[in-house]
Image: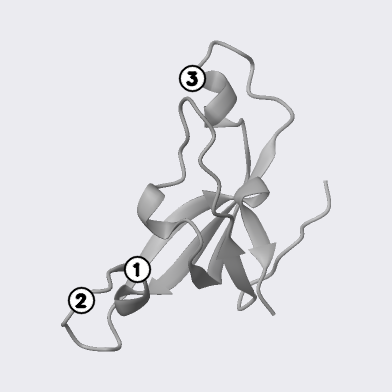
């Protein structure tokens, strides 16, 4: 499986709301962040939750967001960030 993103790439989390178990938090959907780390390929937890084998494997990334971009009311320091592990099928290039 070829890797779509590398460290430093700017990505947007897709703003989708399919039914059922989803590992991607609602609060980061539609938001823009930066790839902080490539975490390798893993079985898809969205499939595992329903008793499937979780294949094909999905690439997992750690995406860093500015806190103020995630929480509109955030009044902490502007350099505060939050890192969220997000699977590749939830990400699109934002560049």
Q: Nearer the viewer, mark 1 or mark 3?
A: 1
Measuring 45% from the left and 27% from the top, which residue is drawn there? 21
Q: Nearer the viewer, mark 3 or mark 2?
A: 2
| Residues under numbered marks 1 and 2 in contact, where contact means CB atoms less than 8 Å apart | yes
Residue beneath label 1, please? 70
Q: Tell me whether circle 1 and circle 3 mark residues in contact (CB < 8 Å).
A: no
The residue indicated by pointer 3 is 49
Gap between marks 3 and 2, in whole Å? 33 Å
Gap between marks 1 and 3 measured at Cα? 26 Å
- Badge 3 crowding class, 10 Å Cα cut-off, few under 14, some 14 to 19, many 20 or more, is some
Q: Secondary structure at mark 1?
A: helix
Residue reaching furthest to the left = 75
Mark 3 touches mark 2? (CB < 8 Å): no
Viewed as shown, does residue 9 lie left or right of 63?
A: right
Give the number of marks: 3
Residue 93 screen position, x and y as percent: 70, 69
The residue lying toward the viewer, choosing from 42 and 19, is: 19
- Residue 31 on image: x %, y %: 48, 66
- In the figure, residue 83 lies in which quadrant? bottom left
What is the x, y in percent for residue 95?
A: 69, 80
- Secondary structure of residue under mark 2: loop
Relative depth, front residue between 64 and 39: 64
Q: Earlier in the sequence, mark 1 or mark 3?
A: 3
Q: Which residue is mark 2?
A: 74
Name the quadrant containing residue 43.
Answer: top right
Q: Is residue 83 left or right of residue 12?
A: left
């Amino acid at each position: 499986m070829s890797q779509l993103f590398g460290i430093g790439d700017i990505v947007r989390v897709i703003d989708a709301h399919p039914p059922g178990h989803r590992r991607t938090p609602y609060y980061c959907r539609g938001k823009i962040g930066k790839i902080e780390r490539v975490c390798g390929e893993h079985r898809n937890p969205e499939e595992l939750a329903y008793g499937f084998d979780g294949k094909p494997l999905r690439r997992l990334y750690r995406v860093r967001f500015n806190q103020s971009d995630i929480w509109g009311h955030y009044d902490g320091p502007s350099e505060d960030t939050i890192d969220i592990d997000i699977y590749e099928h939830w990400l699109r290039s934002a560049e």
